[in-house]
Image (cartoon, grey):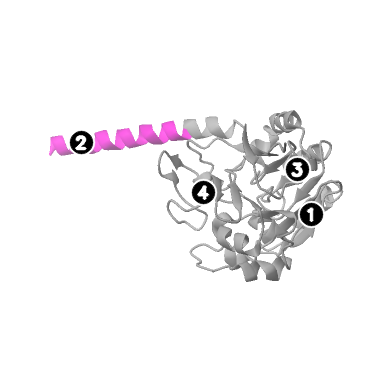
Amino acid sequence: MRVALTAVVLIITIFVILMILLIIESRRELNKIRLTEYVYEGTKVDPSMSGKSFIFLSDFHEAQNGRLNDRIIGLVKETDPAFILIGGDMINGTHENEDITPSVSLIGRLSEIAPVYMASGNHEMKVREGYYGYKSLWERFYDAIKDKVIYIDNKTVVPEGFPVKISGLDLDYEYYKRFSDKKLTGDGVKEYLGECDRDMLNILLAHNPEYFKAYSEWGTDIVLSGHYHGGILRFPGLGGFISPKLRLFPDYSYGMYKNDKSVLYVTCGIGQHTFKLRLNNIPEIVNIRFAEKN
């Protein structure tokens, strides 16, 4: 009996130590920010865009109450971007009186560097549609940023001076709902955004990476997603641990993915909400550079 009790105590002790180490490492990672860079080599890149780049960031979630903002701005300035794309979930939205100063301040400072285009994530969508029981937070947030960004919910725009189309997909709540198996097709994307102009280079801000195949069927060249937070905990050889729909080791949890028609870039994002944990998953902003044309 004494041996069994000793074994139980040892197991509990090891578990507690591991949890403490996880929390310490998670806090360390959440206070860091890095720049991840990709080169896009698609054939539709106009020569005028050769060598130029753009910044993509998502899932800010009022990260660290704004303590990362100065470092984010410094990294963005170093890349000299042609434009900046935001993929949503800048806010949390779970409290009507939430302090949105960090996200509003970051967006304002980004707009001083380059034009900013933003689409909604599921958190903006839920606040806007009143899923938390109020809409005042959305009104406060949008009023504070509307002069700083071009908001493209289910819209397509052409940035001045750049031969590229940027679309922002704002999916309904049913596509984010936990345990939902809601399907999406290319025709479904068309119902939100209309026809894709396949003669131009298309960039699609689509917060949820789960539907990459549908985005590709619609016709876009580049898809930019977040939402999964890199899977929260990342394991070598296995990838991200869990998706927001509580699916283990989901597809498209982080990084670059390709098929015949499109390239998907999934960022692990910057902040966390609810469970503030990360492991092997340092927050990031993404710089995508168009390959040099000879």
* Closer mark to the observer between disc 1 and disc 3: 3
Q: Distance from label 2 to label 3 (Cα)?
A: 55 Å
Q: Residues within 10 Å of mark 3 (few under 14, many from 20)?
A: many
Q: Distance from label 3 to label 4 (Cα)?
A: 22 Å
Q: Residue 253 bears which disc, if any? A: 4
- Of marks 1 and 3, which one's residue comes earlier in the chain? 3
Identity of the amino acid at label 3? Ile
- Of marks 2 and 1, which one's residue comes earlier in the chain? 2
Q: Residue 151 bears which disc, if any? A: 1
Q: How crowded is mark 1: few (under 14 residues within 10 Å), some or many (20 or more)?
A: some
Identity of the amino acid at label 2? Ala
Name the residue that disc number 2 marks: 7
Q: Distance from label 1 to label 3 (Cα)?
A: 12 Å
Q: What element carries label 3?
A: strand
Q: Distance from label 1 to label 4 (Cα)?
A: 25 Å
Pick the quarter of the image with the N terminus: top left
Q: How many labels does the image show?
A: 4
* Closer mark to the observer between disc 4 and disc 2: 4
Q: Residues within 10 Å of mark 2 (few under 14, many from 20)?
A: few
Identity of the amino acid at label 1? Tyr
Identity of the amino acid at label 4? Ser
Identify the residue at image location x=23%, y=38%. 8
Query: Observer-nearest residue: 154 or 125?
Result: 154
Residue 100 seen in render: no
Q: What element carries label 2?
A: helix
Q: Residue 245: x percent and y percent?
A: 50, 58
Q: Residue 84 bears which disc, if any? A: 3
Q: Is mark 1 on a helix, strand or loop?
A: strand
Q: Residue 172: x percent and y percent?
A: 64, 66
Q: Are marks 1 and 3 in contact (CB under 8 Å)?
A: no
